[in-house]
Amino acid sequence: MKKIIIGIICLAIWLPFIATTHFYPFLRFGMYAEPVRKELEYFRITFKEKAKGPEQAFDVRILGLDERMMNYLIRDYYYQDKMSAFERKLQESCKSADWEQSVASWQIWQIHVTAQGVDSAQVATFDYSRR
Amino acid sequence: MMRRKHLGRKPLYWWLFLVGLHLAGLLLYVLYIRSLITAAYQGEAPDWFTQLIKGLYPRFFTEQHRFPMAFFLEKADQILLRYLLFISMAGGVYYFYTSYQQPWRKLTQPQITPQQAYWLRIAWVVISLWAAYDWQGILLNMHRAAAFYAPISFYRLYPVFPSKILIQLCWWGWLVATLLSLTRWKTTLWTSLSVGLFIIQQGWLWGFHKMDHTWASLNYMSLWMPLLVVQQQQAQRKEKTFFPASALFLIQVSIAFVYLQAGLEKLLVGGWGWLEGATFRTFLLSAQTDMGRWVAQHDFLCQLLPVLGIIFELGFLAVFISKFWRIIWLIAGILFHLGTFLLLGAGWYITPWTLLYIFYIFPQKNSHLAKPV
């Protein structure tokens, strides 16, 4: 029995490597494995308090998440073309966090990093001042 | 009478049969299954194969609208290649096990005293407490972003972010179990409960689209802690001065597997291109640390550091060769993790990865590693 359990755990440790996916708590260790052919990217959220006011960085820690986690979240929603759902959940989360800042619009920025440098582009905006 | 040829303890024909079986499977894949994958992508696969894909890889029918066919064929090729790599390594280990019993025993059953086992358990408790002391607060804060919760793995059975009460119950339960695991009362039960609750809470932390590997080696080695407790207790009952702690070896080899897998992933996914300086430079620029920016300006360092990193990861099993190599590799490990923090911003000065090296440096009797350098 002991040998069977040991065998199963050892196999489980290798399973994510073979199947190229996580089977939590057994993980695939693909961090930094992807080759960077052209560029890396990450996302940032900004907001405007007034329609023509300055853009301010949104501190995602207000929602109990860190920058990297939010970056993964936005990336997944962006590439699955579900940014409306993202906006709805962002609003819901801000409400749940009792964040009392008035927001006229949200902006989502995609930042590209290459060996030559960094540039950014706005990929989504949710403007409440026009509604 | 003719004597059968053997390879290890098994007759040669047993090995030949095994190799033949895999070659036949490989042929079947190349000649038939690959074309079935192509057919499935085009919506022309036989029903049984479509059903099989639905069961094994349900995202296929969503992802096929996003990726070209080559992506899926490459994925299937990767899985096959990885399986063959794994089975070859497993065959090698089995051959070593059957052919060299004495060195196998020395390697897999390091002799330690029950007192030493207890010190290791204390070390595990301290590292676990350091790892998860703030999880209750983090999870309660995450409650604000519950709308984004996307459960992983078996958590999909309960696809709602846990209530505040459940979070508190689990964290306090884990704390009490971890502390009680150092007593003599129901030790195995408390240790198992502590490991289980540690893993359960962590699964909630990774339910926001990002899987983190910070505690991965701690998770894997923790799975063997109840076995270490059982072996220690048996030794105490039999009043043994030293006992063969196979659990300690399993802890050591599980951590080594993680490094090996991380190294193999880089070569299998990134190919040799991963070792190019441009790749590493882009990672450095993305992390935007002070030292990373400085290293990014030096071609030689951008070329050298990823090569050293791969050698370290692929060669971590060297810790089992001799005491000398164990010391070299553990020092390299400390520098490796320090480097990933200072250059890539991943981790911190102290990480559970390096703290767990204590499970390698503990004195062991009757092991080939006990010999002086």
Image (cartoon, coloured by chain):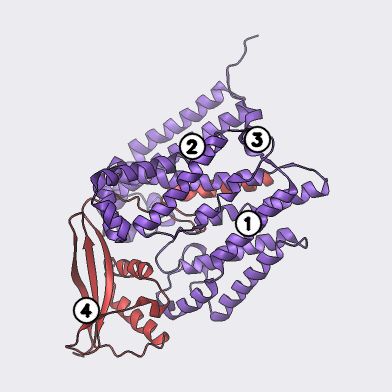
Q: Residue B14: x, y in percent? A: 56, 26
Does residue B180 lie above or below B107 as drawn?
below
Q: Residue at x 32, y 51 (%)?
A: A34
Q: Secondary structure at mark 4?
A: strand
**Mark 3 sits on what residue?**
B367
Whole-angstrom CA distance, mark 1 to mark 3, is 22 Å
Q: Secondary structure at mark 2?
A: helix
* Picture disc at residue B87: 2
Work out whether residue B256 or residue B143 is closer to the camera in this orientation and state it.
B256
Identify the chain drawn in purple: B
Whole-angstrom CA distance, mark 4 to mark 3, is 64 Å
Q: Residue at x 21, y 79 (%)?
A: A125
Give the crowd class for mark 3: few <14, some 14-19, many >=20 residues within 10 Å: some
**Mark 4 sits on what residue?**
A125
* Picture disc at residue B123: 1
Work out whether residue A95 or residue B290 is closer to the camera in this orientation and state it.
B290
Relative to A116, A86 lies left or right? right
Per the rendering, the colour in which chain A appears is red
Circles 1, 2 touching at the beta carbon (< 8 Å): no
